[in-house]
Image (spheres, rainbow, N blue to C red):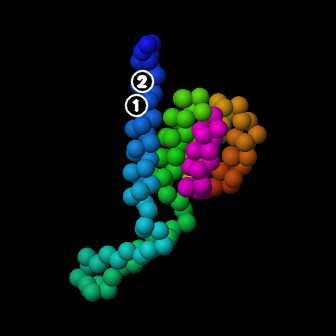
Amino acid sequence: MISESPLKSFLKVLTLSVCTTTVQIIGQGAGVQNEQNTVESLLPEDKGSPVVIDSTDTSGNPAKAQAHFAAGVSWEAQGQAGKALESFRLSLEEDPSNARLAVQVAEKLISLREIELAYQTLLPATRQETAPGK
């Protein structure tokens, strides 16, 4: 029986770590969507009137976005271009207003020879106030 190369063993461990972390991060966010949390104000004059934090913010979930991006990098390292592309797409769905993430995803798409998709990914990002170079 031929043993695995050290690189292949490392990639398996890395993939497992990324997947485990992704599941943990996504699991932490589950169940809090469409809920409101209250925090008591620390100011003496406002004691008793809670501050409402709306967790239904539409700006996205940066933690989930980065988890999907990391999974995409892992899939790419394993030669699974289709799964990598899906993970990169999911990362932008989680945090669509993150122009820097769009640039990172576009770079990965270019490395996977998906030039047109990279271009389409960058178009909305150029309209963002937080776009690199603005």
| Local secondary structure at mark 2 | helix
Residue 72 rendering spot, x and y as whole percentages: 55, 39
Which SS type dominates the magenta stretch? helix
Q: Is residue 44 visible?
A: yes
Residue 15 rendering spot, x and y as whole percentages: 45, 35
Q: Nearer the viewer, residue 78 or 73?
A: 78
Residue type highlighted by circle 1: Val
Q: Nearer the viewer, residue 59 or 3?
A: 3
Left or right? Give the position of 90 relative to 51: right
Q: Which residue is drawn at 57% across and 32% down?
A: 76
Residue 83 versus residue 37 in the image, above or below:
above
Residue 79 versus residue 128 in the image, above or below:
above
Question: From the image, which quarter does the N terminus lie in?
Answer: top left
Which portion, as a residue range, is magenta? 81-97
Q: Which residue lies furthest to the left in this view?
A: 44
Q: Which of 28 and 95 is in front in this view?
A: 28
Distance of mark 1 from mark 2, alpha carbons? 6 Å
- Specify few, some or many for label 2: CA neighbours under 10 Å numbering under 14, 14-19, or 20 or more: few
Q: Which residue is drawn at 46% across and 22% down?
A: 8
Whether tag 1 and tag 2 are in contact, CB under 8 A, the answer is yes
Residue 108 versus residue 26 in the image, above or below:
above
Per the rendering, the mark at residue 9 is 2
* Residue 90 is covered by the magenta coloring: yes
Residue type highlighted by circle 2: Ser
- Specify few, some or many for label 1: CA neighbours under 10 Å numbering under 14, 14-19, or 20 or more: few
Left or right? Give the position of 83 relative to 14: right
Per the rendering, the mark at residue 13 is 1
Count of labels in the image: 2
Residue 28 rendering spot, x and y as whole percentages: 39, 58
